[in-house]
Image: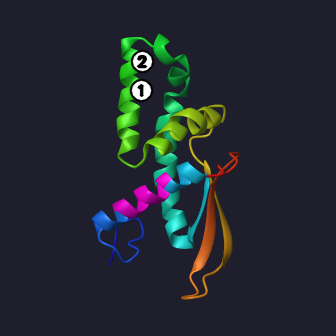
Amino acid sequence: MRHGNSGRRLGRNAAHRDALYANLVTALFTHGRIETTEAKAKELRKFADATIRWGIDVADLVKKGDKMSPVERSKVVHAKRMARKTVRTGAAMDRLFGDIGAHFKSAAAKGGYTRILKTRFRPGDAASMALVELVGLAPSVN
């Protein structure tokens, strides 16, 4: 029995799951909307919301740019290092600390930054598919 063990295993070992979630979060930040299985989407929320929180916490400081004090600069560096654990590309990091953090800074909520919309059943294995998108942000056209 899996008493006290939270989270879905998704038929992968721990390192594979960590890489999967990091890649999904990176794709979500890069594109604004991704389609994946419903189980992966539900697990993705935890990682995406936690990473977005790092962008929100320093959104005001990032706006200052070069006018930050050394203490403020260290807070931004710390947030970027923590987000880098999950986000894989520079483009996704730029979007997180530029657009996404500033957008969700106005919302007083401590979560709920992603929306899951069930879409279809995949033809090959009948897996339930879902769209995951950032609430209130238009998907980027890349």
How far is the residue under mark 2 from the one under mark 1? 6 Å
Asked if labels 1 and 2 touch by Cβ distance under 8 angstroms, the answer is yes
On the image, the x and y values in percent for residue 128 come to 60, 79
Q: Residue at (47%, 46%) from the top-left corner?
A: 50
On the image, the x and y values in percent for residue 11 come to 37, 78
Helix, strand or loop under label 2: helix
> Does residue 53 sit above or below 87 in this rendering?
above
| Residue 22 forms part of the magenta stretch | yes
On the image, the x and y values in percent for residue 48 come to 50, 51
Task: Please say which color scheme the image uses.
Answer: rainbow
In the rendered structure, which amino acid carries the disc numbered 1? Answer: Val
Helix, strand or loop under label 1: helix
Point out the residue furthest to the front here. 142
Residue interval drawn in magenta: 18-26
- On screen, residue 130 versus residue 73, left or right, reads right
Chief secondary structure of the magenta portion: helix
Q: Which mark is residue 76?
A: 1
Q: Does residue 108 appear in the picture of this structure?
A: no
Q: Residue at (54%, 49%) from the top-left corner?
A: 29
Q: Does residue 28 appear in the picture of this structure?
A: yes
Q: In which image quadrant can residue 101 be found?
A: top right
Query: Which quadrant is home to the N terminus?
Result: bottom left
For label 2, the residue is 72
